[in-house]
């Protein structure tokens, strides 16, 4: 479906919603128009795992994963590798001067088994990790970082405000699912560029999912052909309009998330992004069941086939779904969280 057609669908739905509003005031269920838009945009290929944020009341995407399984360590682009599970991701960017590791899974055991073990299966040397980027201060992304920091001594980067946030967490206890945060090292700033060898990543601070979530634009090549990936650093939409949460695990609220998302999407458009990745594999379909996900499509790719991670139409739809779900969540909260029966969407992502 063409991008222009998708935009017209969304615009038409908004106009219809405005024209059909009851004469005595706003329709408290108008947020369902955004849910309908998201479903239309998602079609069949993006529906099962990208509409989770359109549920009212909100549901936890992670809780719906079901059985957690390891993904096969996979070379995705000439320099980008996937080392993760079906629940949470880590990525490795191999440059001419070492490796940039993005996120570290839940705990030291997973970091050692999946990241380091994956490196060795792929013929990579974990001692070449020069930088470890943490997209945000949630322990499913930093849980393995202290192990990597202590073992291989990379520089560890996160936004200053999220460093401050995780410093308020209670100490990790033996047997916890999640590992401790790393020792504070480098602060990421908005617009900062990190260059290692022949690769430059651009970071943006995108408050929302956490106060200092980091999103980034990642250049890659496919058999030498240049592409630019948009990496949104924190997917789940907050539950309140403003900041909420407990010490050590805050968000910045729906309104901040919305503003950040709009800005980052425009930055990607201006830079020419033509693909996307995420830090949860059910968000970007990198790895879900080993049969219908993008890693499976990559394994089955023929020399003449397009890369399954590169398609501007799919990339635009991915972000438009998020726009509609953000609008739906905001409107639902502003309407007083009216009950929705039956739920507008099925959110099972364990199929």
Image (tube, helix red, strand yellow):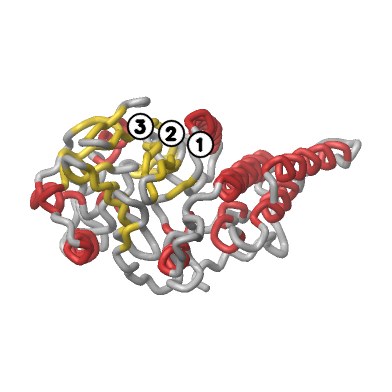
Query: Circles 1 and 3: CB distance less than 8 Å?
Result: no
From the image, tell me which residue sits under label 2. 207
Residue at position x 30%, y 33% in the image:
200
Mark closer to the chain start, 1 or 3? 3
Q: Nearer the viewer, mark 3 or mark 2?
A: 3
In which quarter of the view is residue 49 placed? bottom right
Q: Position of residue 61 (x, y in %)?
A: 49, 59
Element at label 3: strand
Residue 111 showing in the rendered view? no
From the image, tell me which residue sits under label 1. 257
Query: Circles 3 and 2: CB distance less than 8 Å?
Result: no
Residue 202's disc number: 3
Q: Position of residue 323 (x, y in %)?
A: 61, 41
Residue 117's disc number: none
Q: Position of residue 173 (x, y in %)?
A: 18, 58
Q: Tag 2: Cα neighbours inside 10 Å, few (<14), some, or many (≥20)? A: many
Query: Circles 2 and 1: CB distance less than 8 Å?
Result: yes
Residue at position x 56%, y 57% in the image:
52
Mark closer to the chain start, 3 or 2? 3
Q: Nearer the viewer, residue 197 or 152?
A: 197
Q: Nearer the viewer, residue 73 or 38?
A: 73
Residue at position x 69%, y 60% in the image:
344
Alpha-carbon distance for marks 1 and 3? 19 Å
User: Viewed as shown, does residue 332 lie left or right of 157?
Assistant: right
């Amino acid at each position: 479906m063409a991008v222009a057609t998708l935009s017209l669908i969304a615009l038409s739905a908004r106009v219809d919603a405005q024209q059909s509003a009851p004469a005595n005031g706003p329709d408290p269920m108008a947020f369902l128009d955004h849910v309908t838009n998201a479903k239309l945009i998602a079609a069949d290929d993006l529906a099962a795992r990208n509409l989770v944020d359109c549920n009212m009341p909100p549901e936890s995407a992670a809780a719906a994963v079901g059985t957690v399984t390891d993904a096969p360590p996979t070379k995705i682009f000439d320099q980008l590798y996937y080392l993760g599970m079906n629940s949470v991701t880590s990525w490795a960017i191999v440059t001419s001067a070492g490796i940039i590791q993005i996120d570290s899974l839940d705990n030291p055991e997973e970091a050692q088994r999946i990241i380091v073990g994956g490196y060795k299966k792929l013929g990579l040397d974990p001692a070449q990790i020069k930088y470890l980027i943490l997209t945000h201060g949630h322990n499913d992304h930093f849980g393995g970082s202290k192990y990597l920091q202590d073992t291989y001594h990379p520089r560890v980067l996160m936004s200053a405000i999220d460093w401050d946030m995780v410093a308020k967490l209670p100490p990790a206890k033996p047997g916890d699912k999640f590992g401790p945060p790393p020792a504070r090292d480098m602060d990421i700033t908005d617009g900062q560029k990190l260059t290692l060898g022949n690769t430059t990543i651009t970071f943006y601070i995108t408050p929302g999912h956490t106060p200092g979530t980091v999103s980034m634009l990642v250049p890659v090549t496919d058999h030498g052909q240049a592409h630019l990936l948009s990496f949104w650093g924190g997917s789940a939409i907050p539950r309140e309009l403003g900041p909420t949460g407990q010490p050590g695990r805050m968000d910045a609220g729906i309104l901040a998330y919305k503003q950040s998302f709009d800005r980052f999407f425009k930055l990607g458009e201006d830079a020419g992004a033509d693909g996307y990745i995420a830090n949860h594999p059910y968000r970007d379909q990198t790895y879900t069941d080993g049969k219908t996900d993008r890693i499976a499509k990559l394994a089955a790719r023929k020399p003449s086939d397009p890369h399954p991670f590169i398609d501007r139409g799919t990339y635009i739809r991915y972000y438009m779904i998020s726009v509609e779900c953000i609008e739906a969540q905001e409107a639902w909260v502003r309407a007083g969280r009216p009950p929705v029966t039956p739920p507008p969407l099925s959110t099972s992502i364990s199929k």
